[in-house]
Amino acid sequence: MTSTSVPVAVASWREWAPGLRTLTLAAEPFDFTPGQFVNLALDVEGERVSRSYSLSSAPGAPLETFVVEVAGGALTPGLFALAEGDSLWLDPRPQGHFTLERVPEAEVLWLIATGTGLGPYVSMLRAGEALERFAKVVVVHGVREASHLAYRDELAALDLSWIGLVSREDPPAGALGGRITAALQSGALEEAAGVALDERAHALLCGNPGMIRDLRALLEERGLRRNRPRKPGHFTSEKYW
Ligand SMILES: Cc1cc2nc3c(=O)[nH]c(=O)nc-3n(C[C@H](O)[C@H](O)[C@H](O)COP(=O)(O)OP(=O)(O)OC[C@H]3O[C@@H](n4cnc5c(N)ncnc54)[C@H](O)[C@@H]3O)c2cc1C
């Protein structure tokens, strides 16, 4: 990590399920655009280990990120061992272009995530911009276990369609079973949303690279195109690894 990094303390943890938490940092607020990420780091055995984390807070609010502990990972086991008040490194320069500024005009905004890929959408929705700009917003959150449907109550209270999908156990009331890709193919996803994922929509895809690859292929089969800076399209993605 560069010399722009500053020490920050853990302000609080919220545990959604074992190994799945929201981290709030006691950092000075700085400007960023919802959808952007920052780098966090720890010194592990004498080496600085840095990783990227999307912000889930709205600009100006206490800095928050939604994180999963990766067993055997280089950073997250140490991160999850930090107690409130303990320090880590923050590079406060926001990065990335996975923002609504890059999304062309569309009627419907689909915010599709697996796991912690939900974080940037929480920021966009808290900032209010997604709900103001699009006639309809659909949030799709694919997880393995029902307890991983984090932020559900907060999001479901907004003026949007929230669709949770649970792949490894029975879904709770109000959620679907299986994977996002299968639900798109079967029609269950659009039925639950009450709207089509077609050329009138823009889809943001975030999280697991396998989901993003498979979903992109399904969207391309429907004639939808990847969004590029000089060639507007119908979907934009952010891979977490
Ligand atoms: C732009 C960007 C934004 C990101 N934002 C977030 C975020 O908001 N929250 C977050 O938890 N992670 C996020 N990540 C992933 C994060 O940077 C780290 O890769 C992750 O925390 C694992 O770090 P590690 O050193 O513990 O594991 P490593 O030793 O680096 O192991 C990497 C492996 O961990 C697994 N993995 C990595 N990230 C995830 C994940 N999110 N969910 C499930 N498995 C994962 C994959 O199998 C990957 O191959 C983001 C990555 C990028 C590129």
Image: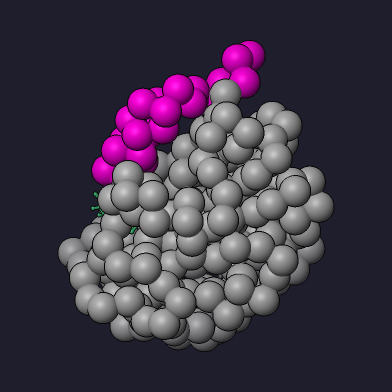
- Judged from this view, the residue extending furthest toward the top is 230
Note whether residue 137 is visible. Answer: yes
Counting from the top left corner in percent of width and height, residue 178 is at: 27, 62
- Seen in the image, is 123 located left or right of residue 162? right
Q: Is residue 34 above or below residue 71?
A: above
Q: Is residue 146 above or below residue 97?
A: below
Counting from the top left corner in percent of width and height, residue 207 is at: 40, 50
Residue under the point 32% across and 49% down: 186
Counting from the top left corner in percent of width and height, residue 128 is at: 77, 58
Give whichever of 67, 2 is nearer the camera: 67
Q: Tell me, yes or no, whether the highlighted magenta stretch contains residue 211.
A: yes
- Seen in the image, is 103 located left or right of residue 238? right
- Judged from this view, the residue extending furthest toward the left is 72
Tell me the quarter of the picture where residue 72 sits: bottom left
The image's colour scheme reads one colour
Tell me the quarter of the picture where residue 98 sits: top right
Residue under the point 35% across and 34% down: 218
Quadrant of the displayed image that contains ligand 1: bottom left
Q: Tell me, yes or no, whether the highlighted magenta stretch contains residue 105.
A: no
Counting from the top left corner in percent of width and height, residue 48 is at: 37, 54
Q: Is residue 12 above or below residue 27?
A: below
Q: Which residues are magenta?
A: 208-232
Give whichever of 169, 120 is nearer the camera: 169
Residue under the point 57% across and 29% down: 199
Residue under the point 32% across and 44% down: 185
Note whether residue 119 is visible. Answer: no
Q: In which quadrant of the rendered image does the C terminus lie? A: top left
